Amino acid sequence: MKKALIVISLSIFLVSMPSFAALSIPRLNKANENLLNLSNKSLNKGDIPNWADGRINGTWGMREFSLLIGMVEIEIGNITGYYGNIFGSINYFQGKFSPFFNENIITNITGFSFGSVIFGYIGDVDLETELYKIKTNESNYVGIGGFNESNFDWRIMSWTGPTFFIKGTFDQL
C-alpha cells in the first residue's frame, strides 16, 4: 500500500511539472511601478496599493558562518514594501531594498510566502564597499524561514550571488 501511494504521488508530481514551469513570478517593472512608491518618508494613504494588507519594514544583508562565533549577520541595508494575503497562509509581497550607505541604489523584490517557504523575483544587486562586493543578476529566488503576525525572517538564495537574509516587521494598515 505504501509503495502504491509513493508511485501515485510521484506520477502526480511528474504530470504537474509542466504546469509549474509555465507559472511566472510577477516582476516589478515600469507598468506597475506606480503601485509601489516607496521611500523613507512617510507614506500617504494614496501611495498604498489597493491589494495591500500592510507594510513590511526591516533589514537585509548576508549571513556568514564563523567557526569561533557561529552565525554572523552582516546588515547591509533597509527593506520596505507592502504585503497582502492571497488565501490562507499564502501571502504576496512587493518591495524595494537599498544599502545603508546609499539609499539611491534600489533593488526591487517581489515574492510569495507559504508557511516557511518563500519564492519570488529579485532585481540586480551591484554593491561594493571595503568589506564586501556583491554582484547578482535579475533572478528568481527561493528561500526558507519563518513569519508570524508581526515579524518575518527569511534566508533567500538566487541563481547567482550570495545568500541574503531579509527580516523585519509587518505593520497592518
Image (cartoon, rainbow, N blue to C red):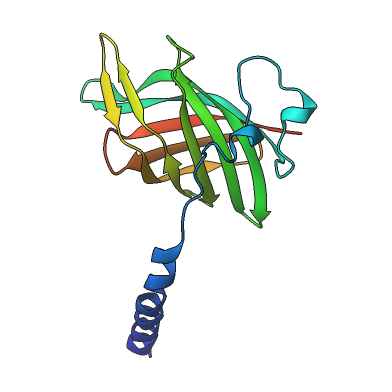
Answer with the quarter of the image where residue 17 lies. bottom left
How many numbered tags mark residues here?
0
What is the quadrant of the N terminus in the image? bottom left
Q: Quadrant of residue 86?
A: bottom right
Classify residue 147 as left or right of residue 45. Answer: left
Q: Is residue 119 above or below residue 87?
A: above
x and y percentages locating residue 156 in the rendered image: 39, 40
Picture coordinates of residue 143, whole percent (x, y)? 40, 45
Left or right of 52, for residue 112: left
Residue closest to the eye, 139 or 16: 139
Residue at 53%, 49% (x, y): give it.
113
Front residue (pair 38, 111): 38
Q: Residue at x 45, y 12 (%)?
A: 100
Residue extending farthest to the left is 67
Query: Which of the image's four quarters has the C terminus?
Result: top right
Residue 108 x/y as whole percent: 48, 33
Q: Is residue 129 rendered to the left or right of residue 91?
A: left
Using the image, determine if residue 58 lies above or below residue 23.
above
Residue lying farthest right?
Answer: 45
Please state which of residues 94 and 35 is positioned toward the viewer in this rendering: 35
* Image point (49%, 14%), residue name: 103
Residue farthest toward the front in the current orientation of the protein: 31
Q: Residue at x 65, y 36 (%)?
A: 35
Q: Is residue 51 above or below residue 136?
A: below
Give the camera-side residue of 63 and 101. Answer: 101
Relative to residue 144, is residue 16 depicted above or below? below
Find residue 107 and report its horizontal and vertical position in percent: 45, 28
